Amino acid sequence: MGLPPIWVRRILLAPLVIVAAVVMLVLTPVWLIIALALTSLVPGRFRLPRVLWLVTVYLLWDAMLVVAMFGLWVASGFGYALRRPGFVAAHYRLAGWGLRLLFWIFGGVLRLTITTNGSDEGAAVADRAAFDRLFTPGTPLVVASRHGGPGDSFILIHTLLNEVGRQPRIVVKYTLQWDPAIDILLHRVPSRFIVPSGFGHGRAGGGLRVEEALADLAEGLGPDDAFVIFPEGGNVSPARRRSRIQRLRDAGREAMAERAEALRHVMAPQPGGIHAALDAAPDADVVFIAHTGLDRLVTLRDIWRELPMDKGITMRAWRVPRADVPDDLDARAVWLFDWFARIDAWIDTHPEVSA
């Protein structure tokens, strides 16, 4: 589905989310009574009230961010100074506050916990201090994460902003511009909305133009910045996995296709975005991110079945000094694949746990 022009999104969609939030809030007693009355007909622990409450919270959250960013737009001289460092920093602070609030509410309702670890020492005990040290400011970072489960990009950005003090430069799918708050925010901080290369017969987007956009985004990466990318190009699914393997075979990379078939939890990464970012940021180290806890949540039916989730999400990070990153593009592609194979093996040894 094509996106409406930006002026339509600002004039119509942004006010619409505010109206929807107010309506849901005003009607809370009505839908709560109805949802509770239907609870006996819906299996699970208050699934319907939980879902309606989370929808209301998200709409209110979105609306509050839209209103706050309208205030920043006015304060910037009706957009005149929005690109100045002070206003960019203000938007990062707003995003950090918003994500803290969102995770506080959603974490309580869904019974989610997030544990971070940056060390293999004492694998049974999470090493939060070691995780934080991997993100110590002073060196630009390219953060390459697996992509599996709903909301994992929100979790990663929340961690970068609120836990380790990094300012993320974000690469996201273009369809997220349908969300007014995300649309406005990511047009005011360094980010790129891209059309992925697609899977199967319906391939679209991707290619050289996307790589050029990512290189432009990584240009001038600062010592407190983190360029965030998901090399798999989308959440893992059986159809996407098969398509990715077939694409490797079509490209004559049979050995790589066989290795991709052996991966259980991740897909073969696409190296183009990483190449573009590393070439544009020659001083950047690389941090790889693995996580587990959301793996079985692929479809809306999966998410509905699991509510409330009662999950402990574990996030593991590894940092690779730039000196250890291959310069040759073919060698770098193999190196990237090796790291995703390592992530796959780590997930094998860290099954989902209850919160």
Image: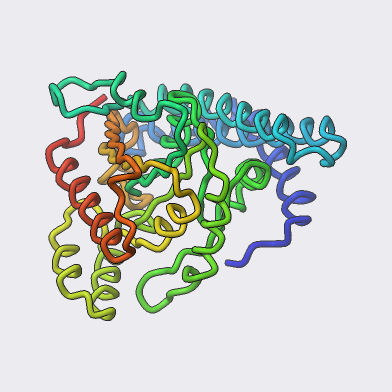
Image: 11 above or below 47: below
Q: Quadrant of residue 315?
A: top left
Visible residue check, residue 289 = no
Tell me residue 328's x, y (percent).
Answer: 32, 62
Residue 331 lies, in percent from the top left, at: 26, 62
Instruction: Please state, as top left, top right, bottom left or bottom right, where the C terminus lies in the image.
Output: top left
Relative side of 73 to 28, left or right: right
User: Can you give x and y, in whole percent of width and height, for residue 267 in the image?
Assistant: 26, 58
Q: Nearer the viewer, residue 271 or 155?
A: 271
Q: Residue at x 31, y 42 (%)?
A: 288
- The spot of residue 287 in percent (x, y) is 34, 40
Instruction: Give me the residue at 49% from left, 63% from top.
Output: 211
Q: Above or below — where is 306 with respect to 328?
A: above
Q: Residue at x 56, y 35 (%)?
A: 58
**Residue for point 44% across, 44% down:** 283
Q: Is residue 138 left or right of residue 59?
A: left
